[in-house]
Image (cartoon, coloured by chain):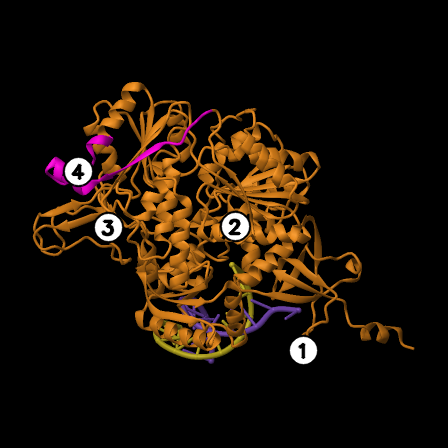
Chain colours: A orange, B yellow, C purple
Amino acid sequence: VDESASVADTPPLCALVAVHRPGGEAYSYAVPPALVGSLTAGDAVEVPYGRQLVGGFVLAVGLPPPVDVTLKPISRRRDDLRLPAHLLELIRWGAGYYRCHLGTFLAGAVPAPVREGGHIAVERLLSPVAGFDASVLTPTQRRAWEQLAAAAPATAAAHARTAEVSAGVIAKLVAAGALHEDIREVGRESLFAPRIERHPLTDEQRTAITAIKGGGAQTWLLHGVTGSGKTLVYQELAEAVITAGRQVLVLLPEIALTPQLAARFRGRFPRLAVWHSDFSDSERMAQWREVSAGRVDLVIGTRSALFAPLPDIGLIVVDEEHDGSFKQDRDPRYHARDLAVVYAKQLGVPLVLGTATPSVETYRNAKDGRYRVVSLRQRPAGGCLPTATIIDMAAECRRQGRRAVLAKELVEGLAGVRARGEQAIVLLNRRGWSPLVECLSCGHTMRCSACAVGLTYHRHDGCVRCHYCGHSEALPQRCPACGKPDLATRGMGSEQLESRLRDDVPGLRTLRLDADTVAARAGHERILAAFAAGEADCLVGTQMVAKGLDFPRVTLVGVVQADRGLNIPDFRAAERSFQLLAQVAGRAGRGERPGQVLVQAYDTEHPALTCALGQRLRSFYERELELRREYGYPPYAGLVRVLWSGPETDAVQVAALDGVERLRAAAGHDAVVLGPAPATLALLKNQVRWQALVKAPSRGAVQTILDRLAANGWLPRPRNLHVAVDVDPLQTS
DNA sequence: AGCACGCCGACT
DNA sequence: GTCGGCGTGCTC
């Protein structure tokens, strides 16, 4: 018997590997003899892929090899990286549910420097070189250069999309010296010192803790009014888990909130890792190592922290669960709170969803008994909930005899706060000086040339800019349409509000917190730290001022144009306004002195306002559920939004029409497909946008429809066109 | 994402 | 003919 023949006849052991390449799916490889028996799912490997060697993760070992392919062997297994089996399971589930390639989902879950391995990998950003002589370029390159000459630093792929050329052209521009390659590094330190606090527990807190500790693996809604001490409950639960040798995951909606809360946690749990997407590569590498080695007890971070490789998770907490930031608005389009529900179930551990204003979906799950509820109705240490007043601005205008911007009551309230040495927060959810610039002669309004939106005037630099693409130009002296010097600004943003407050309330020291001041003053933390230190009487800003801040000296909260947001054509508009108002109102009276909330609006009777301020939560949710049921929206429906975008209207429209036909075929009689139609934002960064919305009776029905769509070849993606499929979208218009 | 392949126009 | 530029398609 010929020995070599018998070896050749034995089919090689086959492993399925997800390679780190976009769009790439899983590929089969032969397991080399040295790894037979020890290779398992979750192992990081290097495999030959085309002409190159790339990284990947083993998904499964021992599957039958595919026919008609000659397997290449796995090159090597990395000994410095492994994905815990439970994390791999979560990622596979997520990729299936959100219809995202496994490679893309892995890229979203495992930071690039970790995936790429030990080398000091860096993000390569390309920025245009000022004054570059374009005459040496070919025509295509020159066209691309003209598109990019004023572009912000971005990756090669992003530039290719902007200029509508292939990646090769961008590479040539780099080689020619038109684009300069840069290395990005982000480092930051917390300005908040660890805060050590040992408050005694209230009865309500104790009851909640006992219930959750004894409840085993289930999902809890911790419904605590703002300032009721949810954090202390999280900490007590975490301590029990950590004492038992397991780890805790705490998710927050925004990076901006992590330093404050992390400081409170760090005082009690020194082996803590803060986890968000804004760390430098080396920081991320170090964190990944520490966490996966089990040297970290508690990870606290934004949605991507869900994928921290903790070896033995014993508890997951999602704070401010209602917040829309848990949904990622690019691929992979996962919702971290929803994935946390699945993860906790897979792990068999308790999940705590904490909020004062649950999402309508969570409220319904709690109401139907799928989640258990524990409530914190009181503020500890005698703190009481603020009193709220809705000011009718129509009446205020009549009283003042002109178009009123600030009600007398608010101005007087702020003067009182200043006189007593207290603090105030004023919210106007719109940044800039004026959202509208128009010509008084011809009625022309300044619009963005690349997006279907108006330009906002910013007084600090005299520019009008687009809040979607960032385009910015000096406010012209004359109307671009008729040439008359009659351009005027209309409407108010946070920049103007701050100025008005300073004018109307003598001596009022203000600080502004919005995207502009955060960028200019190097950070959210710096502004908040200044406010905490008492450097201002009044914090003015956009929705940033509403979230999770805890300043005991704040006794007055003002809201200007509280009913703005209610007219947005989105079925969640009322829910969002309700949450924003209730949250910002909760910033008042967190210390010993009682709080007051003054809300300016025209639509003073809207339930989103009256319920948020009148502590009538149940009535708001019941009404909202009724509307959702009647019109067939979540939680009584499952939605998928499909968005086609590209540079040419015709091509986008054709693809959308064709796509919708396929969607209808897959949906059959099980669902309605609305559209295709231009999206509300019909043009963004020179990309025409068309969309369709699939409304199925449930999220399960959506999956069935998408399975059928996949079986029929999914949605075609003509070149130069982008198709985004968003399962459980938060934005539907 | 790379990389090779093949088409096409410009130039020898 | 040949060469460089550029879009397309494949990678177990």
Q: CA distance from mark 3 to mark 4?
A: 29 Å
Is A408 magenta? The answer is yes
Q: Is there a contact, CB below 8 Å, between mark 3 and mark 4?
A: no
List the residue tagged with mark 1: A68
Residue type at mark 4?
Glu
Q: Secondary structure at mark 3?
A: loop
Assess disc 2: are there few (<14), some (14-19) or many (≥20) residues with their C-alpha within 10 Å of its C-alpha.
some
Q: CA distance from mark 3 to mark 2?
A: 43 Å
Q: Nearer the viewer, residue A693 or A572?
A: A572
Residue with the most extreme right position:
A1
Assess disc 4: are there few (<14), some (14-19) or many (≥20) residues with their C-alpha within 10 Å of its C-alpha.
many
Q: CA distance from mark 4 to mark 1?
A: 78 Å
| Mark 4 / mark 1, whichever is N-terminal | 1
> Which span is picked out in magenta?
A382-410
Pinpoint the chain carrying mark 1.
A
Pinpoint the chain carrying mark 2.
A
Q: Is there a contact, CB below 8 Å, between mark 3 and mark 2?
A: no
Q: Secondary structure at mark 1?
A: loop
Q: Secondary structure at mark 2?
A: helix
| Mark 1 / mark 2, whichever is N-terminal | 1
Residue A455: mark: 3
Q: Is residue A663 left or right of residue A609?
A: right
List the residue tagged with mark 2: A366
Residue A396: mark: 4
Image coordinates of residue A113 in percent, x first then y, are 57, 48
Pinpoint the chain carrying mark 3.
A
Q: Are marks 2 and 4 on the same chain?
A: yes
Q: CA distance from mark 2 to mark 4?
A: 41 Å
Assess disc 1: are there few (<14), some (14-19) or many (≥20) residues with their C-alpha within 10 Å of its C-alpha.
few
Q: Is residue A145 left or right of residue A238?
A: left
